[in-house]
C-alpha cells in the first residue's frame, strides 16, 4: 500500500497497521508511532507538515471522508550503507525548498476535455476537480504558514513547480495558476456566470452530479448530494499567493491540448463554441482513446467530426451514449 493509495478497511487503525512508506514496513501502529516519535525528536519542528499528520480516509465503502491521521515518519535507508551515529550533530544544511508538481489547474467547463473517456482512462475525469483552484490555494497557504523546513529549520529559499501546472493549454487555466501562486482574485469558471456548465450537472450517470437528487454512478458508491456545491466552487475568491520566491517549468499539459494533442488550429471553434461533448458510445470512445495514444492529429479530426455530425442530445435530456451542452466561451487556449 503506497502513500498515493486511498486506504481501505474497517477502521483507520486497521488500515495503518500494515502501512508501507517508501519500502519501510511497520508491523503495528505502535511501531509506526515509535518511528514518528524518533522523527519528531530529530526534526526542528514538525507542526503543520506531513511529519505531524496527513489526510486519512475514514469509513467503509466506495466513498470515504478525510480526517487528520498520523503523520508519515522519515525512514533512514540502510540498504547501501549503515547510518552512522551522531550524524545530526555533523550535518550541515545546504538549502531548504518546496516542490509543487502536477497541480493541473483545470477548466472543468471547457468543451475540449475528455471526461467521457474516464471508463478507459481514470484520469480523464475526477469528481473533485471543480475545487481544484481552491485546493491549490490552500496548499499555498500551508506553505506560507511554515517557518522553514521541518527537519533542518532552514527558511525556504524557493518553491519550484515542476510542470503540468495547468491541465489543458488554456489561457484561463494559466491565469488561475499565476494567481494562486502569485496572489489575486479568481473564479474557477469560464462558462455562463449564472450557472455551472460542465458534466457535473449534465444528468449523465457516468459523473458525480452533486446538486441533483438522483443516484448517479458516484452516489451509488456513497458520494453525497451537496446542494449549492457547483455555485460555491465557481465563486470568486482571493488567493494570497506564495510569500516565498517561486519558479516554474513546463509540462506536457502546459504545452499541449490535454497533454497530447497538437495545436493544429482545428479545435479553435470547439474551445470557444456553444457545445460541450459529454459522452459518446463505447466504440467511438475506444477509437478516440486509441487515436490519442497513437495518432493525436487523427483524434483532433475525430472530435471535429463528432461535433459536426450533431450526434449529441441537448443538455438536460436523458442520455444513453452522448450528450452536448449549449454554452458560450470566452477563454481560448494560449497561442
Image (cartoon, helix red, strand yellow):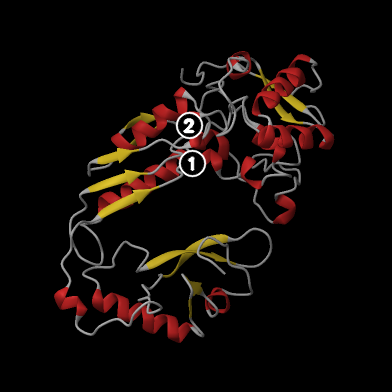
Comparing 167 with 94, the one in front is 94
For residue 276, above or below residue 162: above
Q: Which residue is mark 1?
A: 132
Q: Is residue 172 left or right of residue 110?
A: left
Q: Residues within 10 Å of mark 2 (few under 14, many from 20)?
A: many
Q: Secondary structure at mark 1?
A: helix
Q: Where 181 falls versus 54 (above or below)?
A: above
Looking at the image, which residue sits at the far front? 80
Earlier in the chain: of badge 2 and badge 1, it is 1
Q: Position of residue 99 (x, y in %)?
A: 34, 50
Residue 241 in view, yes or no: no
Q: Quadrant of the N terminus?
A: bottom right
Numbered badge on residue 188: 2
The answer to whether residue 83 is left or right of residue 299 is left
Task: Judge left or right: residue 272 versus residue 178.
Answer: right
Relative image position of residue 281 (x, y in whole percent): 82, 33
- The residue sitting at 41% across, 70% down in the picture is 72
- Classify mark 1: residues with Cα within 10 Å, few (<14), some (14-19) or many (20+): some
Q: Residue at x 22, y 41 (%)?
A: 245
- Residue 148 shown left or right of residue 175 in the figure: left
Q: Secondary structure at mark 2?
A: loop
* Quadrant in the picture for residue 280: top right
* Label 2 with label 1: CB-CB less than 8 Å: yes
Mark 2 and mark 1: span between their CA atoms? 8 Å
Q: Position of residue 211 (x, y in %)?
A: 64, 39
Q: Residue at x 42, y 46 (%)?
A: 101
x, y percentage for residue 35? Answer: 37, 80
Picture quadrant of residue 191? top right
The residue closer to the viewer here, 49 or 39, is: 39
Q: Can see residue 318?
A: yes
The residue shown at (64%, 51%) is: 224
Does residue 278 lie above or below 164 as drawn? Answer: above
Amino acid at each position: 500500500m503506497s502513500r498515493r493509495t486511498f486506504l481501505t478497511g474497517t477502521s483507520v487503525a486497521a488500515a495503518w497497521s500494515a502501512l508501507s512508506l517508501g519500502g519501510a514496513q511497520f508491523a503495528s501502529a505502535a511501531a509506526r508511532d515509535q518511528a514518528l516519535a524518533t522523527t519528531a525528536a530529530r526534526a526542528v519542528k514538525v507542526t503543520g507538515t506531513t511529519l505531524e499528520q496527513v489526510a486519512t480516509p475514514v469509513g467503509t465503502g466506495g466513498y470515504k471522508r478525510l480526517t487528520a491521521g498520523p503523520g508519515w515518519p522519515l525512514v533512514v535507508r540502510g540498504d547501501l550503507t549503515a547510518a552512522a551515529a551522531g550524524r545530526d550533530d555533523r550535518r550541515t544544511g545546504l538549502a531548504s525548498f518546496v516542490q509543487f508538481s502536477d497541480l493541473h489547474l483545470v477548466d472543468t467547463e471547457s468543451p475540449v476535455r475528455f471526461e467521457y473517456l474516464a471508463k478507459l482512462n481514470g484520469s480523464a475525469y475526477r469528481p473533485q476537480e471543480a475545487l481544484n483552484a481552491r485546493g491549490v490555494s490552500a496548499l499555498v497557504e500551508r506553505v506560507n504558514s511554515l517557518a522553514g523546513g521541518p527537519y533542518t529549520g532552514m527558511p525556504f529559499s524557493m518553491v519550484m513547480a515542476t510542470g503540468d501546472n495547468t491541465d489543458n493549454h488554456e489561457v484561463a487555466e494559466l491565469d488561475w495558476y499565476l494567481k494562486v501562486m502569485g496572489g489575486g482574485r479568481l473564479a474557477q469558471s469560464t462558462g455562463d456566470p449564472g450557472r455551472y456548465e460542465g458534466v457535473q450537472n449534465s444528468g449523465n450517470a457516468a459523473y458525480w452530479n452533486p446538486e441533483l437528487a438522483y443516484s448517479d454512478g458516484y452516489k451509488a458508491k456513497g458520494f453525497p448530494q451537496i446542494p449549492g456545491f457547483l455555485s460555491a466552487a465557481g465563486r470568486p475568491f482571493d488567493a494570497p499567493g506564495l510569500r516565498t520566491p517561486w519558479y516554474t517549468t513546463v509540462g506536457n499539459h502546459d504545452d499541449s491540448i490535454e497533454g497530447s494533442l497538437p495545436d493544429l488550429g482545428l479545435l479553435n471553434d470547439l474551445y470557444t463554441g456553444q457545445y460541450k461533448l459529454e459522452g459518446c458510445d463505447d466504440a467511438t470512445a475506444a477509437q478516440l482513446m486509441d487515436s490519442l495514444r497513437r495518432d493525436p492529429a487523427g483524434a483532433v479530426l475525430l472530435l471535429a467530426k463528432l461535433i459536426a455530425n450533431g450526434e449529441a442530445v441537448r443538455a438536460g435530456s436523458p442520455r444513453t451514449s452522448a450528450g452536448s451542452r449549449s454554452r458560450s466561451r470566452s477563454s481560448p487556449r494560449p497561442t
